[in-house]
Image (tube, rainbow, N blue to C red):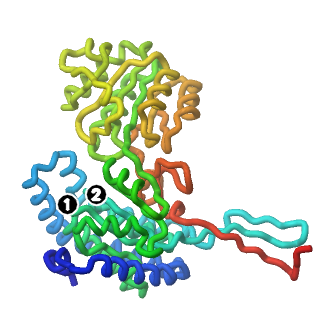
Amino acid sequence: MTVPLKAIDGNADLEALMTDLAVKARAAARVLALAPPEQKNRALAAIERATRANAPAILAANAEDVAEARAAGITSAFLDRLTLTPARIDGMADGVATVREIADPIGTVTESWRRPNGMTIERVRVPLGVIGVIFESRPNVAADAGVLCLKSGNAVILRGGSDSFRSCRAIHDCLVQGLREAGLPEAAITLVPTRDRTAVGLMLSGLNGGIDVIVPRGGKSLVARVEAEARVPVFAHLEGVNHVYVDASADLDMAKSIVLNAKMRRTGVCGAAETLLVDRAAATSLKPLVEMLLDAGCEVRGDDAVQKVDARVKPASDEDWDTEYLDAVIAARVVDGVDDAIAHIHDHGSHHTDSIVAENARTAEKFLSEVDSAIVLHNASTQFADGGEFGFGAEIGIATGKFHARGPVGAEQLTSFKYRVHGTGQTRP
């Protein structure tokens, strides 16, 4: 039964509430770690059914969140991230189905070898434990994170943004229904039942050892706070200052299609392109690319060369090269070949997602090898930076760090490992 907003937000002892959630999540994690794949898959099947059946309730809750956000004067890009539609709910349910079908990572032996003394050593995937996910705006993250943690045998504590609170509660109801039908503990997927921002700080403290890892999913300020205050490991998800580089060898029609999609398909997602780099040797491509963006309603902020091709282009400032707009705005500049493009990305990128459009295979290979980003693409849109598009069914975020996980974080990336050693009585001399 859903608790009224006022009753939740008026809780007098938030620390005790959060600690209790963590204790119950830890107990649930022990059960999930040993749950057979068939039981977890039954829960996922029930979650998919519940999501589809309860779509009207989810949409109604989301409409209230959207109305409140619109009244607060929120930007159109923010509203796009917040808004759910029948198609997006279908996409959530489809993602659950895909997660159900992927191989269960828990118990997988990734390596095995025999020592000269006859012992056999195996490296085996195990869950991380209890994962805390702190996210903003996009309520579908509740579903993605919940089902990925379930598949990988982890319990999860979800703390959504206050702007999507009602939507997340409606989605969480579906997740709990699935757990219940499969006989798994409901505390395996917990939604923090308050909009009090103090709850975030308590999660970052680790809740007395109750949380094993934190995953932030949101804007730069949220990620900065998490990295500054967290007392537990963090899967870093930095901003997506993503680039598309159009090489002199690029096919113009392909370049136009990729650039338009990378920037304008959905401007408010982390995989959206924020900077366009065009090879100086591709001078004939610059004008049609810039005009296409402008005609599509995208503001273009360019260097001197870009400003010369269309009077509608605004001058780019130094800050523009480092900005994640999450809106219909793009920075554009002319570079002297692939080396200059790679240097620009090195200086201004966020190690998230970058793409090259080129027909020259050696140039493309150089870009893919030397650009140090979690995802690099050749002749494809940056908007493919998504766990669903990688075949993971969903993602808990795009990790831009280099420890443990990098790129889309799916079920497999939410595991650690242990070593199992089989002997026949060996002792160490």
Residue 17 in which image quadrant: bottom left
Please name the residue that numbered disc 2 is placed on. 136
Q: Left of 185 or right of it: where is 5?
A: left
Q: Percent from the top left, x then y, of residue 411?
A: 49, 64
Q: The residue under label 2 is which amino acid type? A: Glu
Q: Percent from the top left, x then y, of residue 133?
A: 38, 64
- Disc 1 is placed on an element classified as helix
Please name the residue that numbered disc 1 is placed on. 163
Residue 334, placed above or below residue 351: above
Q: Residues within 10 Å of mark 2 (few under 14, many from 20)?
A: many
Residue 279, placed above or below residue 190: above
- N-terminal of the pair, mark 2 or mark 1, is 2
Residue located at (31% from left, 73% from top): 191
Residue located at (26% from left, 75% from top): 193
Q: The residue under label 1 is which amino acid type? A: Asp
Q: CB atoms at circles 2 and 1 under 8 Å apart?
A: yes
Residue located at (38% from left, 81% from top): 187
